[in-house]
Image: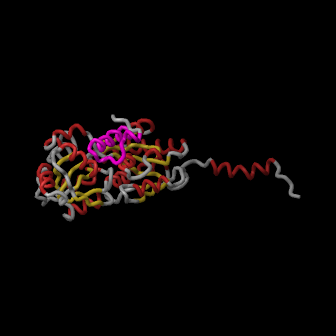
Amino acid sequence: MKKPLSALALAAVLLPLAGAAHAAYPERAIHATIPWGAGGLTDLVARTLIPLAEDELGVSIVPHNRPGGGAVIGVNYVRQQRPNGYNLLVGTQDTTLYPVLGVADFAYEDFTPINVIGQGLVVIAVHPDSPHDSLGDLLAAIEAAPGSIRMGDVGAGATPHITHTILDAVTDYDLDVRKVTFGGDGPGITALMGQHIDFMPLSLPPAVEYLKSGRLKGLAILAAERIDLLPEIPAVTEDLPEAEAYLPWGSFQGIYVHKDTPEAIKATLADAFEAAVGSEAFTARYNSDFGGVTLNLRGDEAQAYIDRWQALTSWLLEDAGAAKVSPESLGIARP
């Protein structure tokens, strides 16, 4: 017969196990999924921010690009991982619109926002040799040749899709374009420079240097007024004053974890990313080089921002006849 373990022996066995169960987080590398291709806005933001967050957390954060399906592939990947804080999502606004657009049966309700990083502007860009010198020229060309003008897109709910919806809502034109879909802004910019597409609404940050150097031509900024960073590009309201009702509008980026992640881990991540986003190094680059505005929201403030953006854009899609599912049926109140 085996002798029962003494209290001291039992404690000696259990103590290491208890220590392992309550090991300080993080104790190993963290993985961050970017659901868009390399070279786009989300990728640029992530790769600028991650080294600063690594300094705060004391471990490596390994970025992975998992593009496809309008970010559905990357978002769903993180959604299916263990909720232990070792799989982050560098997400964008698109996921808030999945239910309204019938893209997927999940949205940010399955995640907790660690930090809403910032919001960027949108530029409607063409090749420098394009015959279109203004937004008005481009819209007239689309009207004159339905279905023939090629627009770069990155999927339902993304920046090009919503920008096209806004333009369609405030003009009398039938803006029937031929959409060519890419895995993010980066591949779209490459196609635009190669004249494989005719125009593309782009998040401003990855396009800034191309616009400054003349490798792309900007027809309009999706803003009520011209911006200091690119003062030669007209505001969209100069051609379409009615667009002001939908402004300011732009993409946003955030850091998310699975909603079932322990609260202590969420707090550790929130502290680290709040410091990283608030750092002078990140703020200067995001605001000046990327042409965006840092928000640095966490907790209830982050969730409130996401909810408001979702409501505004969902009802824009509904009013434009572009929603597949009514926001009202999803419990999204009109703002």
Q: Is residue 132 left or right of residue 183?
A: left
Residue at coordinates 22% horizontally, 49% vertically from top-left? Answer: 123
Residue 327 horizontal/vertical position (percent): 36, 41
Taking depth in this image into account, of 300 and 311 the one nearest to the observer is: 311
Which quadrant: the C terminus? top left
Q: Is residue 188 left or right of residue 145?
A: right
Whether residue 215 is visible to the viewer of this picture, yes or no, is no
* Residue 85 or residue 272, whichever sits in front: 85
Residue 317 drawn in magenta: yes
**Who's the residue at 54% across and 50% down the image?**
84
The majority secondary structure of the magenta stretch comes to helix
Residue 330: image x %, image y %? 41, 41
Image coords of residue 2 (percent x, y): 86, 57
- Which segment is the magenta one? 306-330
Q: Position of residue 324 (x, y in %)?
A: 34, 48
Question: Which residue is found at the position 24% from the left and 63% from the top?
Answer: 191
